[in-house]
Amino acid sequence: MFKLVISVPSNTMILVSLSLIISSTSVIILYSTLQASAFFGMPSPSASNNNFLTYQDSALGIKIDYPVGWTHELHAGSLVTFLASLESDSNTYPAGLGVTVNHLGSRNTTLNEVTKVQIKNLTQSHPDFKLVESTNSILAGNIAHKIVFSATDNMIHERKAMQIWTFKGDNAYLITYKAEPGKYSKYLPTVQKMIDSFQIIK
């Protein structure tokens, strides 16, 4: 789990809890399916094509396609995770993607401010943090920023990860892809399709 607290000069604080559960033996269920649905509003999975389903959550205001065979889970803190199926050579999930929606206290927060603090917090929280890439990007038609990095997560697993975030209105939207380093490239095309399909619907 990469936990980031983004603090900016305007005193806006965004708590980003990236609870991508990569260990099959350490899954923490924060809400049961029924409780989560009652609290956040019932998510709506539907068929989009032969290989992907569509996850839509009107309460969070998001819509995203995910592969058939992947599991999704709604967690506390406006977090949705999608996990790839277990592979025969491992008892941990090889890859996962999480979507977090956070309310901003101020619209004066800039992507550049968040990027600087995000990287600083990762560096301080993870001694082995290594930044691979930091570039401007587009997410759901909005200007965004993307970073790629490697670090050891809270399960003591070495992971390679990508984060991309954007703002719209009073909300910040953060997508995190995390995978075993040797399988990051294998799942990247699938994850990129998921990211490309992401929509903000409110």
Image: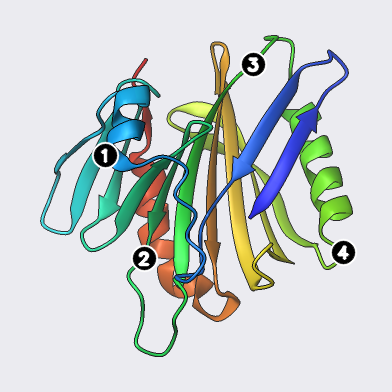
Q: Marks 4 and 3, how far apart in space?
A: 29 Å
Estimate the spatial distance between the alpha carbons at disc 1 and disc 4, rounded to whole Å. 35 Å
Q: Amino acid at mark 2?
A: Ala
Residue 17 percent across, percent down from the top left: 62, 41
Q: Nearer the viewer, residue 39 or 104?
A: 39
Look at mark 2 in the image and give the residue it sits on.
Answer: 84
Say few, some or many: other residues with alpha carbon within 10 Å of mark 1 (under 14 / 14 to 19 / 20 or more): some
User: Mark 1 = which residue?
Assistant: 55
Per the image, label 3 sits on a secondary structure element best described as: loop
Residue beneath the point at 34% across and 88% down: 88
SS at circle 4? loop
**Mark 3 sits on what residue?**
104
Height in image: 169 above or below 152?
above
Q: Around disc 3, counting alpha carbons within 10 Å, would you say few (fewer than 14), some (14 to 19), or many (20 or more)? A: some
The amino acid sitting under disc 1 is Tyr
Relative placement, left or right, of 127 versus 61 is right
Tell me which numbered mark, 3 or 1, is placed earlier along the sequence. 1
Residues at circles 1 and 4 in contact by the CB criterion of under 8 Å? no
Q: Residues within 10 Å of mark 2 (few under 14, many from 20)?
A: many
Does dot 2 land on a helix, a strand or a loop? loop
User: In terms of image quadrants, where is residue 116?
Assistant: top right
Image quadrant where residue 126 sits = bottom right
Question: Image quarter for residue 11?
Answer: top right
Check disc 1 and report its element: helix, strand or loop. strand
What residue is pinned by disc 4? Answer: 127
| Vertical comparison of 95 with 34: above or below | below
Q: Say what amino acid the circle numbered 4 marks.
A: Pro
Calculate the distance from the C-alpha at mark 2 to the C-alpha at mark 1.
15 Å
If the image is split into quadrants, where does the N terminus sit?
bottom right
Asked whether residue 160 appears in the rendered view, the answer is yes
Q: CA distance from mark 3 to mark 2?
A: 31 Å
The amino acid sitting under disc 3 is: Leu
